[in-house]
Amino acid sequence: MRTCAVIPTYNNLATAKDIVIRTLEYLPVIVVADGPTDGTLASLQTIKDDRLVIVSYPTNKGKGYALKRGFLKAKELGYTHVLTIDSDGQHYPEDIPAMLRMSAVRPEAIILGTRVLAQKNMPVKNTFANRFSNFWFTFQTGVSLSDTQTGFRIYPLQGLHGLHFMTRRYEAELMLLVFSAWADTPIIPVNVRVYYPPKEERISYFRPMRDFTRISVLNTLLCALAIVYGWPRRYWRTVYYCFLFLLFAIWANIIRDFYCLFHPKDMSSLLRLRLLRGSRAFLSAFPNAPYRVYYAQGAQTIDVKQPCVYIANHTSLLDILALFSLHERMFIMAKGWILNNIFFGRVAKSMGVVSIEEGLDNMVSTIQEYIDNGYSVAIFPEGTRSITGELGRFHRGAFYLAEQMQLSICPLLLDGFVQGLSKSPFHVGTPKELKVTVLPLIHPDDTSYGIDYRERSRLIRKYYWQLIAHN
């Protein structure tokens, strides 16, 4: 991915040059001079940096128009993502690295630099306008955000929704968020700092009556459009997939009861095989997102007869089905609530899902029994699902087991599952594909990832982080 910054500016002579110079420390910059009359353009032209591109025109046309010109210029120059930041000195360019890190993890998402609303010197009208906008945005999209008015954002240019409908003024940024939410583009907040100068030093071109009226009219239109277009477009996948999940859960329980009744002796192995095939079919039915298994360079084909410890990053409830679909002789260590779930708790128990909440010391003998019978164990080292898709801290349990039992570790990289079914809010999205990548085995005598389980937990997490960042 290639990212540049787009900075729209009007009459910001006192701050624009400083913001551009500080932003250039992190990214190439496209400045859109929106018809300034106070010498801002001349000031910017004194910056000597080949990574700075200035787009200008003589008449002020508004922030929305300036942003659109900046986006089109970024596309022309071959950039895939655009970071927008205001030129009035409100945002800190030094927060750009935090925004970029999240964008690297979720390149398909819009990243919002979310401000703390209760700030010293923050104008009361800004607080009211933000809360007003937040309320209507949630009503229109079902997505709850605490700062929909921030101008500090990262947009993925491919498939950016609402660009053709952008108005020329401040409300354009709200339109982009609403249309993107309707199209299931994830919107992820990242906390950033904000500076509000004292009232006597503050420069604002927001026209309270005229611009607030424009925003109110726009919200009225968006509410009407949400009912006939936005909500149906956003939620049809969730309704469809929940219905499909219900059918899958009913089928799995019927199969489980059938084998308990007619095949009690070999119920477990037969049920695992049926559930493996059912899990593959269920994941393959995901709307417009094929389910695929890839083998990285140097990876070996999964051998069901060779016990090992499978580890995977954990981002979605679908991750468990992805593991079930790979290997019929694998048991999974998971949270206890799965075993008590009304839909698939009984099936999970029959499949040999083990509650990790029992404590590792109390589970070693149980795990050893499974290993002696030729089964492999699968563990999510993070322990809990991530909301944003960021990689969490790796616990040491999986690596301790591998060391104690002298088992190889088979790392699995799961991609697209958090976009498919997010943890909070529960929503079915639009991933390009649901992908499991089988990575090369890490053998017990391989010291490239450390010599004990403590080092391995740290170095293998670093390995995962590098894979996700460059994926």
Image (cartoon, rainbow, N blue to C red):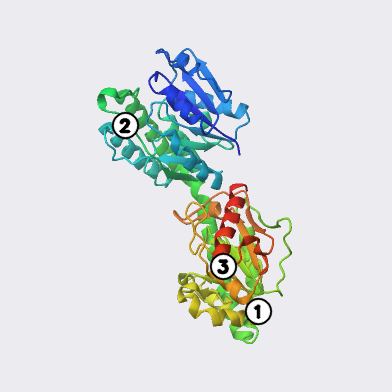
Residue at x-position 42% and y-position 19%: 10
Labels 3 and 2 touching (C-beta < 8 A): no
In this rendering, the label closer to the viewer, 1 or 2: 2
Q: Residue tagged by mark 1?
A: 269
- Work out whether residue 286 can be spotted: no
Mark closer to the chain start, 1 or 2? 2
**Mark 3: secondary structure:** helix
Mark closer to the chain start, 3 or 2? 2
Choose between 154 and 43: the one closer to the eye. 43
Residue at x-position 47% and y-position 75%: 359
Give above or below for 460 relative to 59.
Answer: below
Q: Residue tagged by mark 2?
A: 196
Q: Quadrant where the N terminus lies?
A: top right
**Mark 2: secondary structure:** loop
Q: Quadrant of residue 379?
A: bottom right
Would residue 33 be found to the left or right of residue 121 on screen? right
The amino acid on which the numbered mark 3 sits, given as a three-letter code, is Tyr
The amino acid on which the numbered mark 1 sits, given as a three-letter code, is Ser
Q: CA distance from mark 3 to mark 2?
A: 49 Å
Q: Residue tagged by mark 3?
A: 453
Residue 429: x and y in percent read 53, 50
